[in-house]
Image: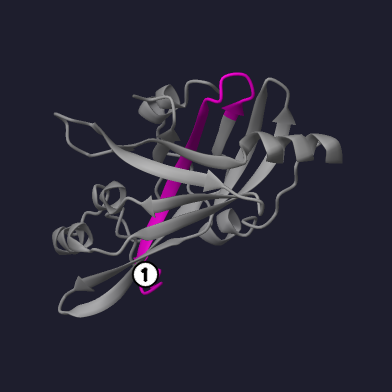
Amino acid sequence: MKNLKLIFLAIGCIAALSLTSCLKDDDNNDNNGLSESEISQCYAAVRGSYTGKLLYETRDAQNPIDTVDVSWSVGTDTMLVLSPFPASAVAAQIYDVELKKALMETEYLSVLKCYLGFYKYDTEVLFYIAPIKADFPVMYKGMTHTLSVYFWSNTYSYGYKSTKTGDMEAQLVMAAAYIDDNESTNYINSSASTLTSIPVIISNIIK
């Protein structure tokens, strides 16, 4: 669990599931097996503001991984908020050249909000993540559109925070990017019918 970077580098394609079934648990924080006291301790342990790095695949054989400075927070509503969510991490996965260019040129700063579901508390707080879609307005083919990025939830997206060192890392897995929520074309996969599994990592221990 401590080496999410290794998971990020090694992860392959996850068997395609229904995007609807993947996202339906976004607000279902089971907090599996934890007592109310332990849940409160988890909240207290992860609450706060963080700065660190976001790592993502570039699809460039010469430089396969890129990093960007990011900030995130966990508030009293127990949501993890990554603000802004870098457009570059999405653009690197877009196969449509014109759309990729439009996304890189947008000045809009998207916010990614994620529900947390805690499932372990001792020297580390372990949690599942259920991201809400991130929207980017883009000028594409002469018109303004919204590119919506969806993520896999729960066992696919997860993280930890050390209660001893304060180290925090989380893996978020992109599943699809649709224009104006038209699900006929997934712009982060050349096959319109296939959902992808593209991990990004946020970490406050990567320098």
Indicate the secondary structure of the residue bearing disc 1: loop
Residue at x-position 62% and y-position 41%: 47
Q: Which residue is disc 1 drawn over?
A: 184
Magenta stretch in the rendered image:
161-184
Q: Residue 139: which quarter of the image?
A: bottom left
Residue at x-position 63% and y-position 46%: 116
Decide whether residue 177 is among the magenta residues.
yes
Q: Name which residue type carries label 1.
A: Ser
**Is residue 98 in sight in this rendering?**
yes
On screen, residue 3 versus residue 108, left or right, reads: right
Residue at x-position 27% and y-position 49%: 93
Quadrant of the snapshot with the C terminus: top left
Residue at x-position 41% and y-position 72%: 181
113 or 59: nearer the eye?
A: 113
64 or 126: nearer the eye?
A: 126
200 or 93: nearer the eye?
A: 200
Across and down, in percent, residue 150 comes to: 45, 57
Across and down, in percent, residue 197 comes to: 41, 44
Across and down, in percent, residue 32 comes to: 77, 39
Q: Is residue 143 above or below residue 38?
A: below
Quadrant of the snapshot with the N terminus: top right
Tally the numbered discs.
1
Q: What is the image's colouring?
A: one colour
**Is residue 193 in sight in this rendering?**
no
Q: Is residue 166 above or below residue 172?
A: above
On screen, residue 131 versus residue 116, left or right, reads: left
**Circle 1 crowding by C-alpha within 10 Å: few under 14, some 14–19, many from 20:** few
Name, please, the residue furthest toward the bottom: 143
Across and down, in percent, residue 42 comes to: 71, 36
On screen, residue 139 versus residue 40, left or right, reads: left
Decide whether residue 129 is among the magenta residues.
no
